[in-house]
C-alpha cells in the first residue's frame, strides 16, 4: 500500500498558528512512492517557542488506534518546552480488514493518490476525507456500520434547519449513537462548540426513502461529505 505525492526541495514542517502541516519532500519534482506501512521520523518546530523535537508520525492507522482517531489525539503534539498543543496534519489512512473499511486523509490542494494495485480492496468501503475532523467523523460513522451517505444527507437537512435560526452555524459532525438510540451531532457556531440529538428513526426512514444512495455503484475512492449531499439534492431537483 503506497501513497503517491508531489515533492518539493527539502524536508519541511510548516507551522501556522495552532496547526502544523507536515510535508514529505524530496529533491525531485515528479511523483514518487512513499511506503506508508511504517512510522516516519520527522522534526517538529513549535510555532510558539521554536523548540525542535524529533517525532514519529504513523501513516497507516489500525483499529487498535481508532479511539485516538475518534478523539483526534493522534493528530496532536504538545511541545515539551512551553506546553503548547498543536494539530498535526499529514497524509495517512485508516484500514480495518475485518469491517472492510479504508479511509484516506487527503488534504485540499495536495496531490495524492492511493495505489490500489498493492492491495486487494474488493468489497471495501473506500473513502477520501479532506480534513482531520472529517477523517475522524468518517471512522466513527463507518465503525458503527452506518451508511455514511445517509448520514451526510441527514446532516445537510439538520444544517439547513438550524442555519435558518442560527446563521452563525459553520459545521456539523456526527458524534455517536446514544444509549437511547438517538443520533448525536456536534455543531460549531463560530468558535463555540455545541451539540444536538435527533431520533434514530429519522436515519432509518431516510434509509428506506432513498435506498438508491446506498445501492449506488462506486468506483474507486469517494469523497462523501456535505458537498456530495448538496450535489445529490440539486441533481434530484433537476431530474
Image (tube, rainbow, N blue to C red):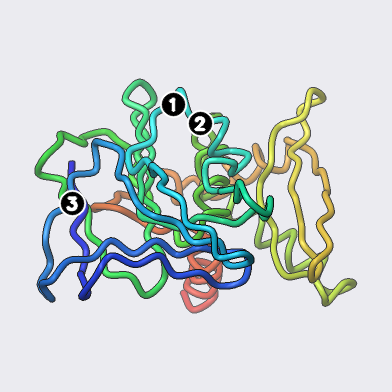
For mark 3, give the secondary structure: strand
Instruction: State the CA–CA distance, disc 1 to disc 3.
Output: 22 Å
**Which numbered circle lies on residue 32?**
none
- 157 displayed left or right of 232: right
Residue 150: image location, x then y, percent: 56, 48
* Residue 155 location (% of width, % of height): 66, 56
Q: Are marks 1 and 3 in contact (CB under 8 Å)?
A: no
Disc 1 or 3, which lies upstream in sequence? 3
Residue 150's place in the image compared with 164, above or below, is above
Residue 195 locus on image (x, y percent)? 82, 49
Query: What's the mark number on residue 63?
Result: 1
- Number of numbered markers: 3
- Nearest the camera: 229 or 142? 142
Residue at x 84% of width, y 74% of height: 164
x and y percentages locating residue 37 in the rendered image: 24, 36
Q: CA distance from mark 1 to mark 2?
A: 5 Å
| Label located before the other in sequence (2 or 3) | 3
Instruction: Choose top left, top right, bottom left or bottom right for residue 67.
Output: top right
Identify which residue is drawn at 82% across, 43% down: 197
Q: Residue at x 55, y 45 (%)?
A: 136
Is disc 2 placed on a helix, strand or loop? helix
- Circle 3: is it few (<14), some (14-19), or many (20+) Cα within 10 Å? some
**Which of the image's four quarters has the N terminus?**
top left
Q: Is residue 166 left or right of residue 140?
A: right
Residue sitting farthest toward the right: 165
The relative height of residue 13 versus residue 154 in the rendered view (above or below) is below
Res 99 quadrant in image: top left
Query: Pointer 1 and pointer 2: residues touching (CB < 8 Å)?
Result: yes
Give the labeled residue for mark 3: 34
SS at circle 1: helix
Mark 2 burial class by Cα count in 10 Å: few <14, some 14-19, many 20+: some
The residue beneath circle 2 is 66
Amino acid at each position: 500500500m503506497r501513497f503517491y505525492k508531489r515533492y518539493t526541495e527539502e524536508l519541511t514542517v510548516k507551522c501556522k498558528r495552532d496547526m502544523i502541516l507536515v510535508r514529505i519532500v524530496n529533491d525531485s519534482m515528479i511523483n514518487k512512492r512513499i511506503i506508508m506501512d511504517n512510522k516516519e521520523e520527522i522534526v517538529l518546530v513549535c510555532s510558539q517557542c521554536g523548540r525542535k523535537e524529533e517525532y514519529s508520525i504513523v501513516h497507516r492507522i489500525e483499529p487498535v488506534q481508532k479511539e485516538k482517531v475518534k478523539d483526534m489525539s493522534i493528530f496532536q503534539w504538545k511541545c515539551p518546552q512551553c506546553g503548547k498543543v498543536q494539530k498535526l496534519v499529514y497524509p495517512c489512512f485508516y484500514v480495518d480488514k475485518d469491517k472492510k473499511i479504508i479511509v484516506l486523509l487527503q488534504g485540499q490542494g495536495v496531490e495524492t493518490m492511493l495505489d490500489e494495485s498493492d492491495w486487494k480492496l474488493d468489497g471495501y468501503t473506500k473513502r477520501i476525507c479532506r480534513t482531520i475532523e472529517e477523517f475522524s467523523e468518517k471512522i466513527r460513522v463507518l465503525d458503527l456500520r452506518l451508511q455514511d451517505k445517509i448520514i451526510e444527507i441527514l446532516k445537510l437537512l439538520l444544517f439547513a434547519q438550524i442555519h435558518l435560526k442560527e446563521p452563525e452555524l459553520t459545521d456539523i459532525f456526527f458524534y455517536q449513537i446514544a444509549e437511547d438510540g438517538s443520533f448525536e451531532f456536534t455543531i460549531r457556531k463560530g468558535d463555540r462548540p455545541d451539540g444536538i440529538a435527533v431520533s434514530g428513526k429519522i436515519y432509518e426512514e431516510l434509509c428506506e426513502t432513498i435506498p438508491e444512495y446506498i445501492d449506488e455503484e462506486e468506483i474507486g475512492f469517494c469523497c462523501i461529505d456535505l458537498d456530495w449531499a448538496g450535489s445529490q439534492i440539486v441533481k434530484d431537483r433537476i431530474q
